[in-house]
Image: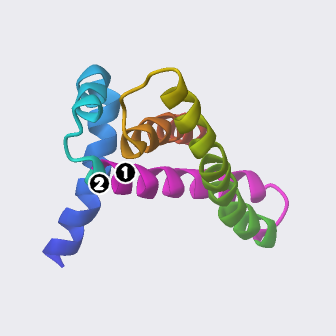
């Protein structure tokens, strides 16, 4: 039980680190420090916040719409991210970027995570 709680706290600790110390967080991404854990944490946090926001806006109509919106909103954001990310990556490579695909993924997830927190707020 304690291990499960520490895992949940770890996901939100990454998000809190992003919100409190944005420059340091972006510098760690630039240097490639702990990218897989950052990516997973940002995916989990943004999906949860977007699902809660979707549920809240869907609850205005009915519980079925709340459930549907809680599933659709994170899916919409993440599918859009997956569609646009390769194009963004290759366009940046053409213009001389030295960042890896994982670094681009982490940067885009950073934007989605901040947006999800702002929507939920």
Q: Residue at x 35, y 30 (%)?
A: 19
Q: Judge whether residue 58 is colored magenta.
A: yes
Residue position for label 1: 39
Range drawn in magenta: 38-63
Q: Residue at 85% of width from left, 60% of height from top? A: 61
In this view, the residue farthest toward the right is: 61
Residue matched to label 2: 36
Horizontal side of 10 relative to 80 (left or right) equals left
Q: Residues within 10 Å of mark 2 (few under 14, many from 20)?
A: few
Instruction: Give how far across and how far down residue 94 sits, in percent.
Output: 54, 27
Residue 97: quarter of image: top left
> Where does residue 51 sit, x and y in percent of width and height?
60, 58
In which quadrant is the N terminus drawn? bottom left
Q: Is residue 24 above or below residue 14?
A: above
Mark carried by residue 97: none
Q: Dots 1 and 2: beta carbons under 8 Å?
A: yes
Quarter in which the C terminus is drawn: top right
User: Quick check: 87 left or right of 92?
Assistant: right
| In the image, residue 36 above or below residue 27 | below
Residue 84: % across, % down: 65, 43
Q: Residues within 10 Å of mark 1 (few under 14, many from 20)?
A: many
Between residue 118 and residue 90, name the one nearer to us.
90
Q: Which secondary structure dominates the residues rendered in magenta?
A: helix
Cα distance between the residues tagged 1 and 2: 5 Å
């Amino acid at each position: 039980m304690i291990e499960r709680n520490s895992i949940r706290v770890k996901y939100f600790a990454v998000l809190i680190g992003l919100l409190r110390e944005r420059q340091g967080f972006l510098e760690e991404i630039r240097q490639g420090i702990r990218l897989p854990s950052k990516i997973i944490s940002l995916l989990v946090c943004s999906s949860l916040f977007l699902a809660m926001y979707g549920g809240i806006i869907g609850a205005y109509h009915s519980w079925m719409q709340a459930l549907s919106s809680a599933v659709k909103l994170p899916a919409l954001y993440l599918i859009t991210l997956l569609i646009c990310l390769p194009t963004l990556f290759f366009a940046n490579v053409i213009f001389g970027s030295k960042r890896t695909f994982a670094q681009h993924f982490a940067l885009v997830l950073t934007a989605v995570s901040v947006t999800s927190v702002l929507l939920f707020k």
